[in-house]
Image: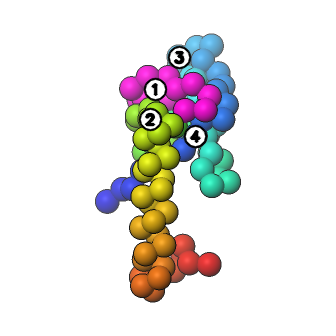
Amino acid sequence: MCLAIPMQVVELKGGGDALLDPQVALVESDGVRKEIRLEMADRIPAVGEYVIIHAGFAIRTLTVEDAEYNLSLMRRMAEVLESEGRLPGALQQ
């Protein structure tokens, strides 16, 4: 099972040639930055918007409100799991 985390677009790069220079985005979530491809996205996001990513590709663009709501649910879920001692070891601090 995959859990896609919304990441915010902080920079758009490339796009001069679909094959040799595809457009990519630099995205960030909680201090983690990653470069992702945009060919599979429902539309090209603007800087500041959020995308859902799967296997290094943006697959859907989210509104800021939807992304913040999804992120708040994930953080709440992590808090509950941590309080119950059920947070996977890799995520515990």
Local crowd size for mark 2, using a 10 Å CA cut-off: few (<14), some (14–19), many (≥20)? some
Mark earlier in primary sequence (2, 3): 3
Q: Nearer the viewer, residue 18 or 36?
A: 36
Earlier sequence position, callout 4 versus callout 1: 4
Most distant residue in the top direction: 16
The region drawn magenta spans 38-49
Earlier in the chain: of badge 3 and badge 1, it is 3
Residue underneath mark 4: 8
Please report whichever mark, 4 or 2, sits nearer to the chain's N-terminal start. 4
Residue at 44% in and 60% down: 74
Residue 9, by quadrant, is: top right
The kind of secondary structure element at disc 2 is strand
User: Residue 31 location, x and y as percent?
Assistant: 68, 54
Secondary structure of the residue carrying tag 3 is: loop
Dominant SS of magenta comes to: loop
Which mark's residue is nearer the viewer, 3 or 1?
A: 1
Distance in Å between CA atoms under marks 2 and 3: 23 Å
Q: Which residue is mark 3?
A: 18
* Dot placed on the residue nearer the N-terminal end, 3 or 4: 4
Task: Please state the total of marks drawn on the protein image.
Answer: 4
Judge whether residue 57 can be spotted in this image.
Answer: no
Quadrant (top left/top right/bottom left/bottom right) for the N terminus: bottom left
Residue 79 shows which numbered tag?
A: none
| Mark 1, residue position | 39
The CA distance from mark 1 to mark 2 is 16 Å
Please state which amino acid type lies under the numbered disc 4: Gln
Look at the numbered disc 1 and give the secondary structure of its residue: loop
